[in-house]
Amino acid sequence: MSCTDSILGIEGLEVQRVDRGPIIHVWAKPKRRLDCIYCLQSPVRIKATHDRTLKHTRQGNQLMVLHVRVPKYHCLNCDRYFRHPIQGIRPRHRATECFRLEVFEAHDGGVSQRKLSVTHQIGSATVERWYQYHVKKRVSELSGRSCPLILGIDEHFFSRKQGYATTLVDLRNHKVFDVVLGRSEPSLRRYLTRLQGRERVQFVVMDLSETYRQIVQKYFPNAKIISDRFHVVRLVNHHFLKLWQQQDPVGRKNRGLLSLMRRHRWRLSEEQKINLGKYLDQYPILRSLYFAKQQLNTLLLVKHVRAKHAKKKLIKLTQLISQFAQSPAKTLAETLQSWLEPIVRMWRFSKSNGITEGFHTKMEMMSRRAFGFRNFENYRLRVLAHCGWNGVINRV
Ligand SMILES: [Zn+2]
């Protein structure tokens, strides 16, 4: 490959003439005659040639148009016909693969169809078509990957018509593994039974949802469930606010008090502590509930604990739960008791569904930018292409 030929970046082509106007025109042809692609014998004759005009990558803000003379061969040995295949140029396309990739990458990075149709001189429908083509290619590159070892499961809203979807996230690699329409066992059954390598999953992080717990126990037999810290703390706070409502409906509506009650104890200043103390003195039951809740939250926020320490903390936690069981917070105690194991596991790990929630925000933005998706499959392709893929599309 000579210097001028290598600028084209297409193997096997020889540049014959270059015309640099407002558009760069390059005339090229294959360097040598090929052997027969069917019988691999050499004597082929050129039956005809045809000219192909293709858009190629832009150079210095100028569009490059490639004119290639492509020979059509006839094999004298096996009497078959074939065209000269050129790497990076696919049959019937009017742009090289490099050019299509360039358009895709620009559009993916946020350049609008309108702008691209000016700079690259293609229609906006073409930009859309090429975009879809590459998104599909990205997703197909993902199809062979195996089930993640640490899985995050959560639901998110898809559309008013089709309802909720379930997100499966690879928490170790910070990638969306898949999105599936539905959040109940019957709607996920088909997907989950076909899922390859389910038994490899070691841990599943999820919120305190009974449906998901049953799904995980059924379809991921070797996985241990870890509850998500954020959701557990939220559940506790939610229950506490309800109890407060029962004890003192007027005080519950006071925004200043609400802010003090919700905060962690260590975030309060001395003055705020005194103010809160004065209020709580009027309601002894609420007072004891408040302090129990604070203790519980402190316990729940612990992470990276060794097994020995976890045992000590477990004793404390069970004591607190039994204390709650005797109080008006009976339902909370029951829920915590039934999720005791996943909550205790939470101490040993730092993984949480924060990543999953972050992806949900990103997916929401994608959905909004597209003015909503009607077709779930298109949505899934888009999500996987943006949140699940981490490589380079192989040129050609
Ligand atoms: Zn042949």
Image (cartoon, rainbow, N blue to C red):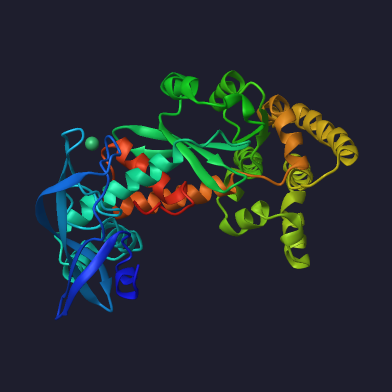
Q: In the picture shown, does residue 35 fall above or below 211?
A: below
Q: On the rendered structure, is 351 left or right of 86?
A: right
Ligand 1 falls in quadrant: top left
Q: Is residue 361 visible?
A: yes
| Residue at the spot 44% in from the left edge and 54% down from the top edge | 392
Residue 274 is situated, as x and y percent measured from the top left of the image, at 77, 61
Give the residue at x 80% y 28%. 322
**Could you say which is closer to the camera, residue 310 or residue 392?**
392
Q: Quadrant of residue 102?
A: bottom left
Q: Is residue 365 left or right of residue 304?
A: left
Between 50 and 345, which is closer to the camera in this rendering? 50
Q: Residue at x 47, y 22 (%)?
A: 194
The image quadrant where one finds the N terminus is bottom left
Residue 383 visible in image:
no
User: For residue 284, which quarter of the picture?
Assistant: top right
- Residue situated furthest bottom in the rendering: 21
Direction from residue 284 to residue 394 in the image, left or right = left
Find residue 195 and report its horizontal and vertical position in percent: 50, 25
Foreground pick, 137 / 242: 137
Q: Depth check: give the residue in front, 63 or 15.
A: 15
